[in-house]
């Protein structure tokens, strides 16, 4: 089966699984370079939770095609698309790996959402909060239209409110159909050793509640190689504070925590840390 393609606003052709996810993901990835977080030509990026690779491709283009990229995606169906996108770069410095990163090497059962791939996670729950966040995001998009809105949002505007509610519920029921898949996990420190990496200029982590697992897989001798960290944190059991302490203990003391407007009243935060 051929994998479909579309074109990003910056002119990059990308392969995708769900076309309506592409503008949402593209908007999200640009939030990683904030609060003095930056990438320069020649840098090394670890893209943990790469999904189909939009951040890797965007950063590669931002750095004039001179960036060392290590992109990790454990779910086979998503990795297949990531690999197609990485191969477009036609560069030995951009690599994709069919596993996730965790505290230790192991096999983990993930919940894979084929109709909403960005929600896929090793930490399945009832999804109530995520559904509420998506509804809130849709409401904001309806009130603040842009050209980049997905086709579903444009369609909703043609219907009266009560019909919109029915359509949104139907869409959410589709999105939350889940499949169980077994995924291989490695660690950041294993990757550092295997690829003889001397420096990680940016460690980006967006792994749907597994962020602390990723960071705990960094051995003490490797923390000094990491210059910047951007991580989406789900504040379960005071996890924002746990992640902040871990980073500060390893010298990443310039830390900014913020919450996107679309995640207001949720437990989802972005954390930016520099040496």
Image (spheres, rainbow, N blue to C red):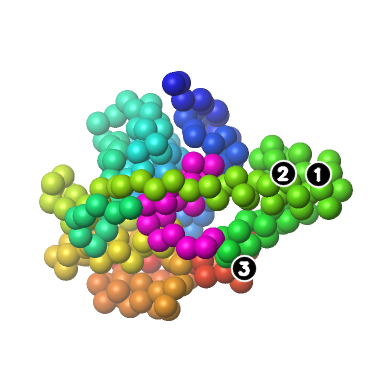
Q: Distance between the residues labelled 3 and 1?
A: 23 Å
Q: Report the magenta stretch's main SS.
A: loop
User: Is the residue 263 above or below the residue 27 in the image?
Assistant: below
Q: Name the residue under label 1.
A: 157
Q: What element carries label 3?
A: loop
Q: What element carries label 2?
A: helix
Tell me the quadrant of the picture where the C terminus can be found: bottom left
In the drawing, does residue 99 fall left or right of residue 161? Answer: left
Q: Residue at x 52, y 63 (%)?
A: 126
Q: How far apart are marks 2 and 3 (CA)?
A: 20 Å
Location of residue 139 (image quadrant): bottom right
Alpha-carbon neighbours of circle 2 within 10 Å: few (<14), some, or many (≥20)? some
Q: Mark 3 points at which residue?
A: 264
Tell me the quadrant of the picture where the N terminus can be found: top left
Q: How far apart are marks 1 and 2 (CA)?
A: 7 Å
User: Is the residue 140 above or below the residue 237 in the image?
Assistant: above
Q: Is residue 119 magenta?
A: yes
Q: Nearer the viewer, residue 79 or 87?
A: 79
Residue 41 percent location from the top left of the image: 34, 42
- Residue 35 appears in the rendering: no
Q: Which residue is drawn at 38% across and 66% down?
A: 273
Mark drawn on residue 153: 2
- Residue 87 appears in the rendering: yes
What span is colored magenta in the figure?
A: 110-127
Q: What element carries label 1?
A: loop
Q: Is residue 161 magenta?
A: no
Q: Residue at x 68, y 47 (%)?
A: 170
């Amino acid at each position: 089966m051929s994998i479909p393609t579309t074109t990003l606003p910056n002119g990059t052709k990308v392969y995708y699984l769900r076309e309506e996810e592409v503008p949402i993901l593209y908007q999200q990835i640009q939030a990683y370079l904030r609060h003095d977080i930056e990438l320069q030509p020649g840098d090394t990026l670890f893209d943990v939770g790469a999904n189909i690779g939009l951040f890797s491709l965007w950063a590669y283009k931002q750095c004039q095609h001179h960036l060392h990229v290590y992109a990790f995606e454990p779910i086979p169906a998503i990795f297949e698309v990531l690999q197609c996108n990485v191969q477009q770069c036609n560069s030995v410095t951009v690599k994709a790996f069919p596993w996730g990163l965790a505290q230790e090497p192991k096999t983990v059962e993930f919940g894979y959402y084929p109709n909403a791939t960005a929600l896929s996670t090793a930490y399945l729950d009832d999804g109530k909060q995520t559904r509420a966040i998506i509804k809130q995001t849709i409401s904001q998009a309806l009130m603040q239209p842009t050209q980049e809105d997905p086709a579903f949002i444009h369609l909703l505007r043609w219907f009266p409110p009560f019909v919109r509610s029915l359509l949104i519920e139907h869409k959410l029921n589709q999105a939350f159909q889940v499949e169980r898949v077994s995924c291989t996990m490695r660690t950041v420190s294993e990757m550092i050793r295997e690829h003889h990496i001397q420096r990680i200029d940016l460690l980006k982590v967006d792994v749907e509640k597994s962020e602390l697992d990723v960071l705990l897989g960094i051995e003490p001798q490797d923390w000094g190689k990491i210059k910047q960290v951007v991580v989406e944190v789900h504040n379960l059991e005071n996890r924002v504070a746990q992640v902040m302490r871990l980073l500060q203990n390893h010298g990443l003391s310039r830390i900014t925590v913020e919450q996107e407007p679309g995640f207001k009243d949720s437990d989802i935060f972005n954390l930016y840390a520099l040496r």
